[in-house]
Amino acid sequence: MTEKTTPERSRRLVWALIIVAGVVLVVAIGLVLSGRLRNGDPEAAPAVDPALPSPSASVLCTPAPTPECPARRVTAGLETIVTALQNSDLVRARQELESALLAFADLTDQPACGGVAQQLLGLQALVAASEAWDSAASSGSVLQTDEAARLTAVAAGLTARTEPDGAGALAAGLVSAIEERRSLMEQAIAPGRVITRADTIAAELAGGLHPLCEVNSVIKPLLMDRTGGVVDTVSRMEILSDTLFAIAGGQLMMVDLERVHGPSPAAFLQPVVPDDGAVIAGAPVTELVDLTGTATGDLLLLEKSGRLLRRTLDNEWSLERPAEVDEMPVAVAPFGGRSYLLDPGANDIWRHSPEGEVEGYPAAFFLEGAFRDVSFAVDVAIDGAIYVAHRTGITQGRVRRYFAGVEDPMFRPDTDLGTPVAIFLPDEPQSVLVYVVDGSGRRVLGLDRETGSFRLGFEIHVGDTGLLTSGDINGGRLYLTDGETLFITALSPHAAAAMDCPAVPFPHPALLDQPELATMAMQLPVSATLPSVLSHYPGGRWPEFGYGVLDGLILSGAPYSDTVRAAAPGTISRIVVDPPPLLEADFLVISNTRRVPPDVGETLWGSQVWIDHGNGIQTRYGGLSILPSLQKGQTVHRLAILGYAGDGPVLFGLWANDVYLGYGRSMPETITGYRALFEGE
C-alpha cells in the first residue's frame, strides 16, 4: 500500500474517528438494552474471578488480525498497547493508541475492518480507565475513584464483547482493584462500625508514628458556600456530636458528619449566622479567630476584637464576654464552666465565669510573680492542667504544661514538635494524650499528658498537601485539615496500621494563602524593622485607633524625614492628602465596638498612597508627607520614593483580594507570615 499524503491522511483520520464514534454509540446502545451497562455502575461489569492476577501481572493474549482485513500495522500497534498496559506504562499505551488510530485511517475504505474498530474501541476505553485509576490511586480523591469506576465499567463492558480476550481480563482486574480501594476507604472511617473508647485507648497504648495516605484515609476537598463566590481556607475546626464546625475567612461554617462520611465526593460547608441577624450586643459578628465546644454542646466563638460569643444548639447567639481594652486573646478553651482566654500580648491567660468573678479564682490565671512565657502562643487546651502550644519561629515550636498557676517542670516533650498550629484533647475521657498539630510537618503528635513524652502520631503522605491548620478527634476518628482538604481515618490500630504510604515532597508553604507574595521580593518601605509589639501588627488594637482592630503594620522606628519607598513595583491606584480629622463620635464607636468602620478607616491612615501590584495584591502607605509629583495611574518601581516620614509612625498595609493580609488568622500566624516575608525566617 502506498503512503498517503498529509492532507489525505488527515481526511482518513477524521473518517476513522467518525467510524469509531459510531461504533461506540452502537455498542453502548446495545449494552444499555442488554442491561450490561447500568449508568456506569462497576457492578454491571463481568464478575471478577478471584483467581485472576492483578493488572500489572496479567498475561494478555495477543490479538489476531481479522483475516479479511489488511490490518497488520494496526494489530501490531494493539499488541504494543497491551504490552504497555501490562507494564503499567500508561504514557506508552496512550502514544501507541494514538498511533493505532492514525494507522486505522488507512483502513476506512475497508468494509471488513469493523472488527478492528471494535478492538480499538475497547482498548481506547481501557486506556482511559487505566489513566483514571492511576490518578485516583495517586490522589486518594473520592471523586476520581468514582470516575475511574465509571470508566472501568464501560471498558469492562466493551472488552467483554471484543478481542483481544486479555483486555477483558485487564478490565476485570481494574474492577477488582477499585473495589478493594473502596473497601479500604470504608474501613478508614468505618461509618457503619461503632468505634468504642477501648479502640482509642488501644491506639494510644500501641503508639508509633503512622503514615496517612490514600490507602488508609478518606480524603475530601472542603467546599464553601460563600456569598459572592469567595472561597476561604479553614483555619480552625471543632467537632461537636454529629456536626463539624469550622472558621473560614473569619466566618463560622458547618457540615453534618453524616454528609462528611457519606458518598459525596466533597464536604460542603455552609455558613452559620444568628437567626435574628448578625448583630450581637450592638455590633456585627466579624472576623472570628477561634472556636471551642462546651460540655453542654454550646460553641464559644472568639472574635479578633476580643469579644467572646456563645452559640447554643438552637442557634441562639449571645455576648459571653465583652472585649477588654488591654487584652488581645487569640484562643479560648473551656473547663469547669469557665472560659480560659490565651493572651500572648499580656503574657497571661484570662479566666471568665458567666456568673462573674468567683472568689478564689482571679481573672489572671498565673500567680503573681510566677514565671510564664506565653508570648507567641497559638493555642490552649485544658483538662485541669493547661497545655499551651507556642510558635518560636517558622518551623520551631514547643508545648508547656501549667498547673495551679505555675509551670510543670516535669512536662518535657522529647520530640521535635515542628510548627505547632493547634493543640486539642480528644472527646474520650479515658484518653491519656494531648495532641499537637504540626503545620509544616503535616503531622499530629500525641504527647503523654503528664510527662510530654511522644506516644502516638500520624503523618500525612499525600502530595500537594498544604500546611495543616487544625485537627480534632471525635468518635474514635482523627480529622485533619490543611484548610482546603479534609483527611479522615479511624484512630484504632487496625485501621491506621502502617501501610504502603511512601513519603512525598511537599510544596513550599504559601504565605498566608498568597503564594504570589513569595516571588515579589518585597521590602519594608522605611528603614525601621518589623515591630516587636504584638498590637502593632495587622489584627492588633492600637490606642490611636481607639483600640479598634488594626489593618496594617505600625512602623514606629522610622526617623523623621526618612524616605518612604514602594515595597514592590506596581501602579499607584489612590492618593489621599490630608483627610478630615477623626470625629469624636466615630472614635467612641470604635472604642465601644473595637471595630473601625470602613468609612472612617481612611481618616486613621492620614495622608496615604495605595499601589496595585496585580493578582489582587495591594500595598498601602500612611502617615507620610507625599511627594508632590506623584500621580494616580503612575507606574513605580521597587524602592521608588513615595514621600517622607512625619512626626508619627508610618503605617504599612498589605492587602489581598480586598482584605488585609492576616484577616481571619490568629495574631501569631500573622506575625509568622510577615517575618517570613520581610526577614526570611
Image (cartoon, grey):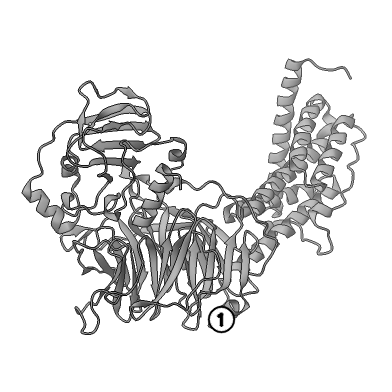
Q: In x, y percent, where is residue 32?
A: 67, 50
Q: Is residue 676 above or below residue 397?
A: above
| Residue 23 or residue 311, whichever sits in front | 311
* Callout 1 secondary element: helix
Residue 666 can be seen, yes or no:
no
| Residue 602 or residue 559, whichever sits in front | 559
> How many tags in the picture?
1
> Is residue 616 found left or right of 310 in the rendered image?
right
Q: Is residue 658 above or below residue 52?
A: above
Q: In x, y percent, where is residue 67?
A: 93, 35
> Is residue 354 found left or right of 468 in the rendered image?
left
> Is residue 678 found left or right of 576 in the rendered image?
right
Which amino acid type is shown beneath numbered disc 1? Ile
Residue 521 can be seen, yes or no:
yes
Choose top left, top right, bottom left or bottom right for residue 366: bottom left
> Is residue 410 found left or right of 298 in the rendered image?
right
Q: Quadrant of the N terminus?
A: top right
| Residue 579 or residue 105, whichever sits in front | 579
Q: Residues within 10 Å of mark 1 (few under 14, many from 20)?
A: many
- In the orientation shown, which residue stands out farthest toward the right? 67
- In the orientation shown, which residue stands out farthest toward the left? 584
Residue that appears at 46% across and 42% down? 515
| Residue under pointer 1 | 201
Q: In x, y percent, where is residue 251?
A: 33, 56
Q: In x, y percent, where is residue 52?
A: 83, 60
Residue that appears at 65% across and 52% down? 138
